[in-house]
Image: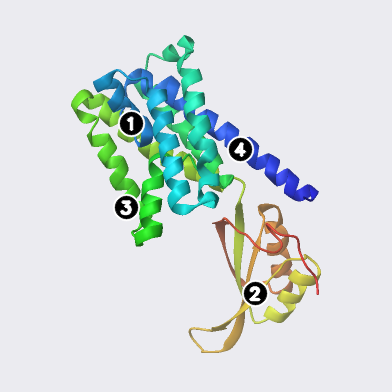
Amino acid sequence: MNNKSRKKLIRNIVFILVGLFCDAFGTAAFVLPYGFVAGGVTGIGRVFHHYFGMEISIVVGALSLALLLLGLVTLGRRFASTIVAGSILFPVFLNLLGRIQALQHLTGNPLLAAVFAAILMGAGLGLLVRAGASSGGSDVVPIILNRKFGWPVAPLMYAVDATILLIQLPFADTEQVLYGILIALLLSVTMNKVVLFGSSDVQFTIISKKYREINEVLQTHLDVGTTLTHGETGHLGNDLDVILCVVNHESVHRVKDAVLKVDPEAFMTMVNVSGVSGRGFTMARRYW
C-alpha cells in the first residue's frame, strides 16, 4: 500500500468513527429524550421500547446485526463490508451515550433539540457517505430489493421510513411528529452539505473568435485543462469552438484576466460545480 492509499484509508476510518459517533450522539442526546419520531432501526427500537419495555440500543443492535447478516447472505461480503462498521458501532455508541445522564438534559427547548439532532445526524451520515460506508439498518432491505428485482432504491427507502414513522404515531403527540419531520428535512440538507463540502469548483464556458489563442494561453501558461466543443453563432451562423474548463476558486480571477487579455470582448459564464473528479482533480495530472 503506497503512502497516498494509506492516508486515504486512515481518513476514511476517521470519517466513519466520527460519523457514527455524531449520528449516535444526536440520537441519544436529542431525539430519544424528547420522544421525537425517528426513521430507520431507531424508530423500530422506539416501538419495541414502548410496547415491550426493551432497551432501544439493544433492539437497534439486534436488528442491525440481523440486517448485516441478511446483506451478507444475499449480496455478499463486498456489500456487507460497507455496513459492518455502522451495524456494530452505532448501537454500541448509542448504548454508551444513552447511559450518560447529563446528555439527557442538554436543553429544555425541543426546537433547539430538533435542530441540533438534525445537524449532528446529518453531519454524521455525510461523513459516512464521503468514506464510502453506510449506517446499514433499514437501508439494507431496499438495496436488496433493488439488486434482486430492479426496484428503485429511493422510493423504497422513503416507503420504509414512512412506514416506521407511521407505526410510532399511536404513542407520539403532534409536536413529536412535527419535530421528527423537521429533523428528517434538516438532516437531508446537512448531509448533502457535508458530502459536497470542499468539492466545489468553477466551470467556465468561454466563447470567442480568438478561441485558439485563449486555449493556448490556458493550457501553456495557466496549466488549465480545456475541452473544445463545436458551436455556431446564433445571429450570423458562424462556426467556432466553445472552450469549457473547470478550475478551483483560487484560479478564477487568473483565468478570467487571461481570457480578457487575449480578447476583451470574449463572452464568459461561470457556474459553481460540485463533485468534480478525474485527472487534475481527484487524480494526478498526466502530460503526454
How far apart are the alpha carbons under marks 1 and 4?
Answer: 24 Å
Q: Which residue corresponds to mark 2? A: 227
**Disc 1 vs disc 2: which is toward the camera?**
1
Residue type beneath disc 4: Phe
How far apart are the alpha carbons under marks 3 and 2?
Answer: 37 Å
How far apart are the alpha carbons under marks 2 and 4?
Answer: 35 Å
Q: Answer with left or right where residue 268 lies relative to residue 156.
A: right
Q: Percent position (x, y) of residue 25?
A: 49, 24
Asked if disc 3 and disc 2 are in contact, CB closer than 8 Å, the reply is no
196 and 165: which is toward the camera: 165
Q: Which residue corresponds to mark 3? A: 155
Asked if disc 1 and disc 2 are in contact, CB closer than 8 Å, the reply is no
Q: Percent position (x, y) of residue 54?
A: 33, 20
Does label 1 or label 2 sit earlier along the sequence?
1
Residue type beneath disc 1: Gly
How far apart are the alpha carbons under marks 3 and 1?
Answer: 18 Å
How far apart are the alpha carbons under marks 1 and 2?
Answer: 49 Å
Q: For the residue carrying disc 3, how many other residues have a C-alpha within 10 Å: few (<14), some (14-19), or many (20+)?
A: few
94 and 31: which is toward the camera: 94
Q: Which residue corresponds to mark 4? A: 15
Residue type beneath disc 2: Thr
Helix, strand or loop under label 3: helix
Tell me what residue is drawn at x 60 percent, y 85 percent.
Answer: 240
Tell me what residue is drawn at x 38 percent, y 41 percent.
Answer: 138
Q: For the residue carrying disc 4, how many other residues have a C-alpha within 10 Å: few (<14), some (14-19), or many (20+)?
A: many
Asked if disc 3 and disc 1 are in contact, CB closer than 8 Å, the reply is no
Helix, strand or loop under label 1: helix
Q: Percent position (x, y) of residue 198?
A: 62, 46
Above or below — where is 140 with respect to 219? above
Q: Which residue corresponds to mark 1? A: 43
